[in-house]
């Protein structure tokens, strides 16, 4: 998608179809519906802050639905944090729902089904955050989806104010500072999520924060090792397993759950990758550290809502 997109030059009768094509090619697979397509309008202005994409956008009234079939078509999609500037949106995910108005924000995870309804024409900011930047600090994202974050709590207010300030200076941000600004935004949103969960915490020293990142890097580099365990990670860093567990706790993570989710993500990506479609499901599981194919299939189905075979077949139908 270009840095700026609008429908001004598109005939009214074609605007809805053009918009749907942009959504399909730029964001994640979803169903979108609009009752008055001839009156629909939209524009999107994108800024890149390192790994974080920030859209300032306008959307007319519409309904969005993302289901299990859509999720099977894409893997490792970025998390979304959105703040209405005007108008309002109704969000529904993980058995929770909320009406979000100007000055509030919500978190949306494309890895699970959701529904959105723009109740009235809405201008908003949308931060697309790579999953790894949040899930390494928030162990259960589903606890913070489907709810609104207002200005009543300090870190939510701080994160919102910072995001809104970016909206006013985005044109003046220099490329050499964009990545740092994006990282600050992610840190502030992370603190706001911790705050809502009652888990506000900081790493006690820069050294411990660096050790935590080192542990995550080691794990990601050795996911294919079926014998990977907490002891191996600790030994590679010259620290005790108790100390390592403490680093994970400070980061809001459970070691076993983190490793499992990372392995499942790698498997899902390969099951839908055209260059490795001929690799058997069992071989894919073994490649990423699963030693028991039956256990892998059960775990995969629990996580993605369908078996690995159905997941692959659904992709081949596209």
Image (tube, rainbow, N blue to C red):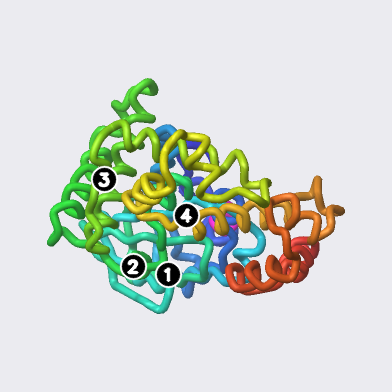
Question: Within 10 Å of the Cα at label 2, are there few (<14), some (14-19), or many (20+) other Cα atoms?
Answer: many
| Distance of label 1 from label 2 (alpha carbons) | 7 Å
Q: Which residue does the numbered mark 3 point to in the structure image?
A: 188
Secondary structure beneath dot 1 equals strand
Q: Which badge, 3 or 4, is on the more N-terminal residue?
A: 3
Image-quadrant location for residue 244: top left
User: Left or right: where does residue 107 sit relative to residue 76?
Assistant: left
Label 3 neighbourhood size at 10 Å, few (<14), some (14-19), many (20+)?
some
Residue denoted by label 4: 255
- Identify the magenta region: 18-22
- Whichever of labels 1 and 2 marks the residue nearer the N terminus, that label is 2
Where is residue 111? Give x, y as percent.
53, 62
Q: Which residue is mark 1?
A: 116
Quarter of the figure that contains the N terminus: top right
For the point 54% across and 61% down, which residue is it? 16
Instruction: Say whether residue 302 is visible.
Output: yes
Residue sitting at 43 percent across and 74 percent down? 94
In the image, farthest residue toward the right: 278
Q: Which residue is painted at 69% across and 51% down in the image?
A: 288
Residue 93, relative to residue 245: is it above or below? below
Q: Residue 189: x and y, percent?
A: 29, 49
Q: Which residue is mark 2?
A: 89
């Amino acid at each position: 998608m270009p840095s700026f997109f609008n429908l001004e030059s598109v005939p009214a009768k074609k605007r809805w179809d053009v918009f749907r094509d942009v959504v399909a090619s730029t964001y994640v697979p979803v169903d979108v519906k609009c009752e008055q397509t001839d009156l629909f309008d939209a524009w999107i202005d994108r800024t890149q802050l390192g790994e974080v994409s920030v859209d300032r956008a306008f959307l007319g009234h519409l309904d969005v639905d993302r289901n299990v079939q859509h999720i099977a078509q894409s893997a490792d999609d970025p998390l979304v944090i959105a703040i209405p500037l005007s108008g309002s949106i109704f969000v529904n995910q993980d058995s929770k729902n909320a009406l979000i108005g100007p000055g509030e924000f919500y978190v949306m995870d494309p890895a699970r089904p959701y529904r959105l309804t723009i109740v009235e024409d809405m201008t908003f900011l949308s931060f697309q955050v790579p999953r790894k930047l949040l899930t390494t600090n928030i162990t259960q994202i589903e606890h913070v989806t489907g709810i609104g974050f207002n200005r009543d709590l300090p870190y939510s207010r701080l994160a919102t104010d910072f995001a809104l300030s970016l909206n006013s200076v985005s044109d003046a941000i220099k490329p050499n500072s964009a990545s740092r600004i994006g990282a600050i935004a992610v840190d502030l949103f992370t603190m706001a999520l911790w705050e809502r969960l009652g888990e506000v915490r900081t790493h006690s020293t820069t050294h411990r924060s660096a050790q935590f990142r080192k542990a995550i890097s080691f794990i990601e580099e050795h996911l294919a090792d079926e014998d990977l365990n907490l002891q191996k990670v600790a030994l590679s860093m010259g620290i005790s397993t108790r100390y390592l567990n403490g680093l994970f706790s400070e980061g809001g993570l459970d070691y076993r759950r983190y490793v499992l989710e990372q392995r499942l993500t790698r498997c899902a990506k390969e099951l839908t990758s055209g260059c490795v479609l001929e690799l058997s499901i069992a071989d894919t599981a073994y490649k990423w550290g699963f030693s028991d194919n039956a256990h892998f299939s059960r775990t995969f189905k629990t996580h993605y809502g369908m078996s690995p075979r159905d997941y692959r077949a659904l992709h081949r139908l596209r």
